[in-house]
Amino acid sequence: MSSTIESEVSGYLHRLFPMARSITGAANRETLQMLSEISPIVTHEVPSGGEVFDWTVPQEWSVREAWIADSEGRKIVSFEENALHLVGYSTSIDQTLSWEELQPHLHVHPDLPEVIPYRTSYYRSEWGFCLTHDQYAELQNLSGGLRVLIDTEHFSGSLTYGEILIPGKSQREILISCYICHPYMANDGVSGMLLTAFLARYISSLPSRNWSYRIIFVPETIGAITYLHENKANLSHVEAGLEITTIGGPGGFGVKKTWNSDHWLNDVIEDAFHHRGIPYKEYPFDIHGADERQFSSQGFRINTGTICQDRYHEYPEYHTSADNLDLVTGAQIEAGLDMYIEVISAIEKLDFFINTRPHGEVMLSRHNLYPTLGGAIKPIAGEKSELSLILWLLFYLDGHTPLSKVAKTLSTSEETLRPLVDQLLSLDLIDRT
């Protein structure tokens, strides 16, 4: 991609970074509005209190101010300085406390003394502050009471999410998701939402599309669950998903595979890296991570893969104030965007066919595909005669398995299978989907 795109990405990176996002609130709406400058996003509001599967849409949360001051009124810790100083969804308090009373509500990073950790209390009424080791020591050594003010409001509002629906020639869909809830974090936050918006712009710019795309911007976990609940009836055409997160770090690429490790999306991503000659680390699916775990749940089973650069949990700056604009650059996000574009380009080239006679084995002799004399053929494991390949094609082509996956499974090439596919198409034994 061009340096003009890198400059554009960098500009949005700096604009989006210093915003006090959470799982609800005005900053999320402002974020979606800003991302809409890149690719138009339709915003949806889901009222607080609604039941979404096993969860409840939370109350909205807003912050007017929050700080800790010494006895002379000098602020030691302030939300205004960095949103990470306040534990997310903290309740209000206005008291003068002793160190012993305040200390249980303070959080520091166990290993990095100079950073502010990121902590939240979304589903429990609590309050707290996050601070550096120096700030902690300063508060501990102060004489006199410590004034603590948190002026926040929990109220019946709504949860906000954004959606872009891009139609293609087929109803077959790819779900692309990112989360918009992390404040003041560049890799685990801005990089995913920013790349997703630019990827949506790229997909929209294609002169034609074989696939349709469902692209969503949600607060993590509760937003994805809410989206699935609100759109359950609309997801029947989703064939696979991409969860875009932590894609702007300076480290190498990594790939988290889908819950079904044999799914064709894993092959597509692997081939994209091989095509570009870029090494990557591979991670198996597990139930910890981002919203791929929601899309992969039993009620949906959407195979969802992730490409990352400095994966969550694995870089020391993760969930701290050090995940900032010194760590992430527009060029690094652009490199991740190039890989996702490579994957989308490969998905667009996939061919899907379906056996039109799926109930039992096709009577090949009826279609002049079987030797005239039966009983003489002894199957040999692994052999790739024309007859065997035809039988395997009819076995695998179910409308959901691309020809490339069939070829890989059979240890052959698409070029070898093409004439047989054409023959089966001409006999109406398979149809293109």
Image: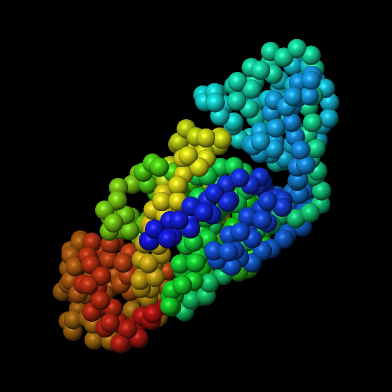
> Measuring 72% from the left and 40% from the top, which residue is drawn there?
89
Q: Is residue 296 visible?
A: no
Residue 274 horizontal/vertical position (percent): 28, 55
Dividing the image into 4 quarters, which one contains the C terminus? Answer: bottom left
| Residue nearest the viewer, comparing 295 with 425 | 295
> Measuring 25% from the left and 70% from the top, which residue is drawn there?
414
Is 224 situated left or right of 392 in this image? right
| Residue 223 higher or lower than 66, as above or below | below
Q: Is residue 431 visible?
A: yes
| Residue nearest the viewer, comparing 62 with 52 | 62
Quadrant location of residue 109?
top right
Residue 173 horizontal/vertical position (percent): 50, 69
| Residue 41 higher or lower than 369, as above or below | above
Identify the residue at the far right of this view.
Answer: 95
Coloring applied to the structure: rainbow
| Residue 385 higher or lower than 426, as above or below | above
Is 373 situated left or right of 392 in this image? left
Residue 410 horizontal/vertical position (percent): 26, 63
> Measuring 42% from the left and 46% from the top, which residue is drawn there?
309
| Residue nearest the viewer, comparing 250 with 278 | 250
| Residue nearest the viewer, comparing 84 with 75 | 75
Counting every numbered tag in the picture gives: 0
> Measuring 58% from the left and 60% from the top, which residue is drawn there?
35
Dividing the image into 4 quarters, which one contains the N terminus? Answer: bottom left
Residue 275 horizontal/vertical position (percent): 27, 58
